[in-house]
């Protein structure tokens, strides 16, 4: 984080790295104060914290009835409450500053739109995020005039540290699950992070001023493909 902020500063822009637990409201409030002290306003919130944990994922041969509730709850807290709390803390600053503008974007998942095996807790959490995105978009628009927009992105499959062991072998070849995903993706590959970032920039910019309450898939056609 410090290295990235250094690159931003070197480019002539300004950055402020703040380590914050999204489940701790006091830390979020401190981060909000630090940002407002530095820039005087908050225009964009990107909810990107989240992920899965092994305890909320069914292992091979394990049934839903054997899934531990503690891991399930941990994933719900991280993904759902870890989105709602930042929306409350930073969204309030947007309203207080200028309710005629502001953008909230949450990173959802294809697991919210298609039934993906094994990831029970993650599926439930991301499905809830999609519902909250639509609800909050309507609520803020009705209360404050539609200037603050709330949307989400549903990434398809991008290789990362949390899913690498599920999708690839140590030698880099695809696991059976990884191969099935590629076969079900019309683009026939995993996504590149630049393709995700470009959609995020669009949702944060003026080009999407009339886009509100939607979940945008960035998935190479995965969600559109029936398999036949």
Image (tube, helix red, strand yellow):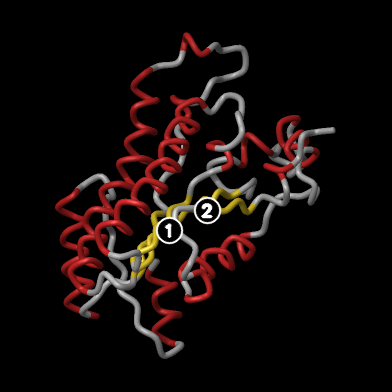
The part of the image, by quadrant, that contains residue 223 is: top right
Do residues under tags 2 and 1 come within 8 Å of each other at their CB atoms? yes
Residue assigned mark 1: 105
How dense is the environment of label 1, judged by Cα within 10 Å: few (below 14), some, or many (20 and up)?
A: many
Please state if 142 lies on the left or on the right of 55 as rendered. left
User: Considering depth in this image, is 200 or 137 the residue closer to the camera?
Assistant: 137
The structure residue drawn at horizontal position 47% and vertical position 51%, both measured from the top left corner, is 107
| Residue 28: x %, y % from top left | 21, 56
The CA distance from mark 2 to mark 1 is: 7 Å
What secondary structure is marked by label 2? strand
The relative height of residue 53 versus residue 198 in the rendered view (above or below) is above
Residue assigned mark 2: 153
| Residue 36: x %, y % from top left | 19, 74
User: Considering depth in this image, is 137 or 72 the residue closer to the camera?
Assistant: 137
The relative height of residue 226 versus residue 198 in the rendered view (above or below) is above
What secondary structure is marked by label 1? strand
The relative height of residue 200 versus residue 122 in the rendered view (above or below) is below
Residue 213: mark in rendering: none
How dense is the environment of label 2, judged by Cα within 10 Å: few (below 14), some, or many (20 and up)?
A: many
């Amino acid at each position: 984080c410090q290295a990235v902020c250094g690159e931003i500063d070197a480019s002539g822009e300004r950055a402020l790295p703040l380590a914050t637990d999204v489940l701790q409201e006091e830390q979020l409030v401190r981060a909000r104060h630090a940002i407002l002290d530095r820039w005087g306003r908050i225009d964009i919130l990107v909810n990107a914290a989240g992920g899965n944990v092994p305890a909320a994922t069914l292992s091979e041969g394990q049934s839903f009835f054997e899934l531990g509730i503690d891991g399930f709850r941990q994933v719900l807290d991280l993904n759902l409450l870890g989105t709602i709390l930042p929306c409350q803390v930073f969204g309030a600053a947007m309203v207080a500053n200028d309710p005629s503008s502001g953008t909230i974007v949450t990173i959802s998942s294809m697991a919210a739109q298609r039934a993906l095996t094994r990831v029970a807790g993650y599926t439930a959490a991301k499905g809830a995020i999609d519902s909250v995105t639509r609800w909050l978009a309507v609520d803020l628009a009705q209360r404050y005039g539609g200037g603050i927009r709330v949307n989400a992105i549903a990434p398809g499959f991008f290789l990362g540290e949390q899913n690498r062991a599920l999708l690839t072998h140590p030698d880099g070849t695809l696991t059976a699950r990884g191969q099935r995903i590629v076969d079900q993706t019309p683009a026939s590959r995993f996504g590149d992070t630049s393709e995700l970032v470009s959609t995020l920039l669009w949702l944060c910019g003026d080009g999407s001023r009339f886009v509100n309450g939607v979940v945008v898939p960035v998935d190479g056609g995965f969600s559109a493909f029936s398999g036949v």
